[in-house]
Amino acid sequence: MKRFPEYYTIWNIAGHYGLRIFALLVLIFLMLPILVIMPLSFNSEPFFTFTEGMLALDAEAYSLRWYQEVVDDDKWRLAIRNSFVVGIAAALIATVLGTLAAVGLASPWMPYKRFITALLLSPMIVPLIIIAAGMFFFYTRFNLVGTFAGLIIAHAALGVPFVIITVTATLSGFDRSLFVAGLSLGAGPFKVFWDVVIPLIRPGVISGGLFAFVTSFDEVVLVLFLAGPEQRTIPRQMFSGLREQINPTILAVATLLVVLSAALLFTLEALRRRSVRLSGSA
Amino acid sequence: MNDLGSDTFLRFDNVKKSYDQKSLVVKGFDMDVEDGEFITLLGPSGSGKTTVLMMLAGFESVTSGDIAIAGKSINRTAPNKRNIGMVFQNYALFPHMTVAENLAYPLTVRKTPKAQIKERVAEYLKLVELSDFGARRPGQLSGGQRQRVALARAMIFEPTLILMDEPLGALDKNLREQMQFEITRLHKQLGFTVIYVTHDQTEALSMSSRIAVFNDGVVQQCAPPAELYERPSNAFVADFIGENNFVPGKVITLEGTTAQVQTDGGTIVAQAVDGLAIGHACRVSIRPEKLFIPPTSHAHDNALTVRFNTRIYVGDFIRYYFKLPDGTDIIVKVLNDLSAPEFADDAEAQLLWLASDSIAFPAG
C-alpha cells in the first residue's frame, strides 16, 4: 500500500487514484483503435471482426495471408514504393529549405519576422482541402498534376513548417557567441555554419525531417487531388481499398505503418538522447 | 588604404561608433598599443568599451576613423581574416567537440599539417595544465578549466592580438584570482599582446600594463595602473578607480601644482589639476587609506575635524565612517591592529593627511 502524507484526507486519496484512473482511460481511448487492428490483420478469414476461432486463440484462425497479399499485389507494391520515394524526396527538400528558413528567422536582423514565420507555417494551419484545391488549379498551368515532381513539391511544402518549428526550437538554445568564436578562430561564415551550427542543431534538423517524412507518408488529401494512378501512395491505396475490395489487406498495411511510425519515434528519441550525451551537461 | 605610421603595432585613430546614426556610443577613440602590452579597457557597463573590442575583432563596423595593425587599416578586413584571437565570457567552446578538437579547430581551418596540429595541441594543453583533459568534452569540465581551454584555443594559432571580453566574469572570486594569475603568467611567458575588457577594477589594476578608463564613450584617462590610482586626471577616474573621499570647497590660491582650498572645516592644501580656477568650487579627493587618526606617527600637513558616525569591522582592516560639518561622508581605512581606535557616538575626531596625497578637481 502506498504511503500518503499524514495530512491527506480521504478526498485527497480518492483524487490521487481518480487522476490515475482517468489518465489510464484517456490512454485506452487513444490507443485502442490502433491496437485493435493489429490482431485483426492476422485474421485468416476475410472479415473485419474477431472470429470465434480467434477469440479461442486457435492457431488455425490466424494467418499471414493478408501480409502475403500486400507483398504479392502489384498495386500495393507500387504504392509502398511511391510512398517512400515521395516521402523521402519531400522530406529532404523540406529539411533543407526549413533549416535555412529557421536559421534566417533566428537572426536578430531579420525584418518582418512574425509575418514571414506565419506565412511559412501556414500550410500547417490552412485546411488541407483548400491547399489541395489551390494547388490543383495552380499545377494545371504547369502540367504538374499527375507527376511525381508535383506531388513531391506539394508534400515538401507541407513538411517545411515541421522542420522550421523543430529547428527553431534547437536554435533558441544555440549560443550565438559560438558562431562569433568560430569566425575569430579564422573560419569563414559558411565553414563555421557547417562545422559548428549544423552539428549542434542536428537533432532538430533530423526530427524535423522525420516529421516531414511522416507527414508526407500518411497524407491523402493532396494525393487525391494531385496524383495520377502512377503516383498512388499507401494511404491513397488504402482509401480505394476501403471502397472497392473490403478485406483485411488494409489492416495488414495499417499494422505495418504503425510499426514504422513507432520505429521512427524510437529513432528520434535515441538521436535526441545521443546528442544530449555528446554535448555533455553544458 | 591609409598609411598610419607603420611602426605602431596597433593604432586606433579617432574611432567612432554609432548604432542609430544619431548618438555616438564611442566618441573618438585614440590609442597606440605596443607589441606585447596588456591593455585593459575599463569602465561601467554601457561606456563603450565592449564596442571598441567588437570593432577591433570585426564584429561591429567602424562608423568613422581607422583601426590599423602595423600601419594597415583593418576596417575592411573580414573578422575571420584578421588573425585576432578572442576569449569570451561564456567561454564559447564548441560543445560537440572534445577539448583537443576545440584547440585543433583554428589550426585545421588554416590547413596546418596533421602531425603538427597534434604536436601543437599537446603543447598548449600542457601550457594550460590540462594535458590529461584532451579527450573530454567542454561539458565535463569546471568553469575554470573551460576558461583555460578557451585561452589555449585563442592562443594556439599565434594570433597578432588576443582580445578578452570579461573572461573571468562567470567565475567565483577564488577562481577569478587564480585565473588572473594564470593569464598574467601566460602573457609574460609567451609575450602576446592583450586587449582586455572588464568592469572589475581590481582585475584591471593587477594585470594590466596600461588601463584605459571609459565613461560615456570617451576615454577619461589611459595610464599604467599605479599612475591611474595615484594620479587620476579627473574626478570620474578618482571616483571609479578604488575608493575615494571627496571634500567640497572653494579654491582660494593657486601656485603651480598646489592649491589652497577653503572648506567648511578650515583651509586645506592639495595638488591641483588643470582646469582649476581661483574662486571656483572644487572637490578635494583623498583615499581612505591615506587618512590618519591621531595619535599617529605619520607625517601630515592637512587636518580636518569630523564627527564619528560608525565603524565597520571588515577583518584585515576597519572602516570608519565620519561626517564633515557640512554632512559629507568621509571613510577611513585603518589596519586592524592595536592602534585602531574606538569612538563614542558623535564624538569629535581629527583626520590628518599629506597634501601630496590629495588632489583638487574642478567641481561639476
Image: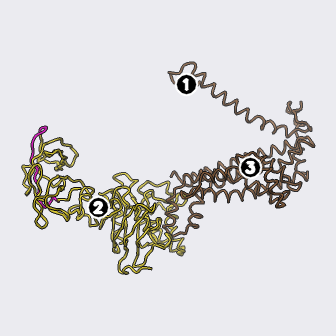
Chain colours: A brown, B yellow
- Of tags 2 and 3, the one toward the viewer is 3
**Residue density around tag 1, few if under 14, some if 14–19, many if 20 or more, within 10 Å:** few
Residue B145: quarter of image: bottom left
Q: Is residue A218 magenta?
A: no
Task: Find the magenta span and give its range.
Answer: B344-359
**Residue density around tag 3, few if under 14, some if 14–19, many if 20 or more, within 10 Å:** some
Quote the CA–CA distance across marks 2 and 3.
61 Å
Q: Is residue B351 magenta?
A: yes
Amino acid at the residue labelled 2: Ser
Q: Mark 3 lies on which chain?
A: A
Q: Looking at the image, which is closer to me, B52 or A16?
A: B52
Judge whether residue B47 can be spotted in this image.
Answer: yes
**Residue density around tag 2, few if under 14, some if 14–19, many if 20 or more, within 10 Å:** some
Residue located beneath label 2 in the image: B206
Q: Looking at the image, which is closer to me, B345 or B207?
A: B345
In this rendering, position of residue A221 left or right of residue A282: right
Quarter placement of the N terminus of chain A: top right
Chain-order first, disc 1 or disc 3: 1
- Secondary-structure class at tag 3: helix
Q: Do labels 2 and 1 share a chain?
A: no
Q: Is residue A255 above or below residue A27?
A: below
Q: Where is residue A2 in the image (x, y as percent from the top left)?
A: 58, 25
Q: Mark 2 lies on which chain?
A: B
Q: Do labels 2 and 3 share a chain?
A: no
Residue located beneath label 3 in the image: A215
Q: Where is residue B212 in the image (x, y as percent from the top left)?
A: 31, 64
Q: Which chain carries label 1?
A: A
Quote the CA–CA distance across marks 2 and 1.
60 Å
- Secondary-structure class at tag 2: helix
Residue located beneath label 1 in the image: A3
Quote the CA–CA distance across marks 1 and 3.
46 Å
Amino acid at the residue labelled 1: Arg
